[in-house]
Image (tube, rainbow, N blue to C red):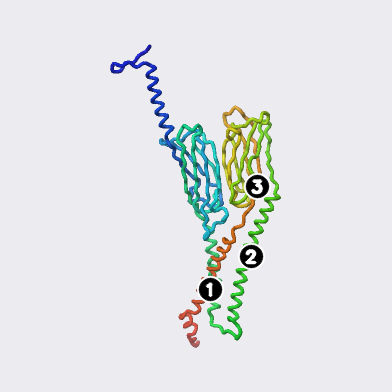
Amino acid sequence: MVKFKLKNRQITPSLLISILGLIGGSTNSLAAGSQPKIQLTTVPPIEQVVPADKPVKLTFQAVDEQGKRVEKAKIRLQIFTPAKTPWLTSDFPIVEGTQLLDLEAFASTGELQLQKVLPIRGKYQLIVDVQPIDGKAFTPTQQTFTVSVPEKSVKYLNFGILAVVLLGVGLGGGWVLGESQKTLPGEIAPERVRLLLSGAILVAIASLLVVNIRAELAESHHHGDHVHGKHSHSEDRPSPALQTKWLGEDQATVGKLAQIGLQLSDRNTGNPITDAVLQVKAIGNEHNETVFLYQGVPDATGKLTWQQQFFDGAPHTIQVKVSPQPGATRQFPSFQVSQEIEVAGVAPPLSVRFITLAYLTGILVLGLGLGIKLRRSPKFLQFAQRPKTQEL
């Protein structure tokens, strides 16, 4: 037997193995007790994101104290939209203060990557949970990210143009009302004043009716599609070895999460398929725009599920491309599965419509007051009453 001698003490190989085992155990204990940090990157940078435009690429990485990505992790992502703003509503007020996405993924390299359209401006809450698959590699952690999406610049421009037009109309009306006019017996106000006020009231009523009728028609149209729409689940090239089953809903409602999922199984044995790659794409049918992109793998039961909200009330199509994992034993030709989802729109609350009308009316009234004040100002009266010089 080989023996080592250190300071008159003999260390046998068995004792050396025990010491190394204790050291390794201590190292593993430290690794198991470490808590990873989560890093978030966005493409483009969040300050350049435009609401309801192109998908934003979100990348979450769970790293240890040395900055290395952890392995064999399960990552859950929840995205919550900005809180309700009753006095400055967004383009989709029903979406405010709701959950936009709930996704749980297996991240073998500690990374979760997806692309998602952020529909409205404001501060989003992104809650990320990271847990080890075996429950021992590291300490589970949760982190909340707050990202602020700016409003579209064109909205400020459009509102500015509309405000200037309304202010100009108000100034013109105030200029007319500011002129001294005689009230005939039996009249409450001069004829010009009465005609101007009557016209303003008719315009306000017509605007309110148009806004409400359009909202009700949109809701009725989406409700009809929701009830009578055709829902299809199809494969472009059915695989002879794999079978797909749609697990999600084919109907959704704005402001609520819809359950979406797909299950893969062996067509002959019925066993779940786990060695496949699923590339998910959600497309808005109205403008043929992609609103969600994600690539994942099935779980132990062959399922890939998530919850997603459709914010614009238009029909959507979910496309899932199924491919074999690189280097896997099971190899098969890639194929695509499609599912159409009808989305029921929800009209904005009546209070939101009245608030918008109140803003526009306020600008008009402000212009009216300024016009009356300018017409009746002492400087203008002096200028109007100044005698004209005789022409030579």
**In this rendering, the label closer to the viewer, 1 or 2:** 2
Residues 337 and 36: in front is: 36
Q: Amino acid at mark 3?
A: Gln
Where is residue 127 drawn, in percent x and y?
A: 49, 44
Residue 209 shows which numbered tag? 2
What residue is shown with label 3?
Answer: 251
Around disc 1, counting alpha carbons within 10 Å, would you say few (fewer than 14), some (14 to 19), or many (20 or more)?
Answer: many
User: Label 2 vs label 3: CA separation?
Assistant: 30 Å
**Image quadrant where residue 262 sits:** top right
Q: Quadrant of the N terminus?
A: top left
Of pointers 2 and 3, the one earlier in the residue sequence: 2
Q: Which one is nearer the viewer's eye here, 9 or 38? A: 9
In the rendered view, would you say 243 is above or below 41?
above
Instruction: Evaluate whether residue 392 shows in this view.
Output: no
Helix, strand or loop status at disc 3: strand
Question: Quadrant of the rendered structure where residue 319 is?
Answer: top right
Q: How dense is the environment of label 3, judged by Cα within 10 Å: few (below 14), some, or many (20 and up)?
A: some
Does residue 297 appear left or right of residue 70 in this picture? right
Q: Residues within 10 Å of mark 2 (few under 14, many from 20)?
A: few
Q: Position of residue 167 (x, y in %)?
A: 53, 69
Earlier residue among tags 1 and 2: 2
Which of the marked residues, 1 or 3, is nearer the chain's N terminus?
3
> Looking at the image, is 282 positioned above or below residue 172?
above
Residue 187 can be seen in this image: yes
Question: Where is residue 119 drawn, in percent x and y?
Answer: 55, 51
Query: Could you say which is closer to the camera, residue 369 or residue 213?
Result: 213
Cβ–Cβ under 8 Å for marks 2 and 3: no
Residue at 65% over, 39% down? 246
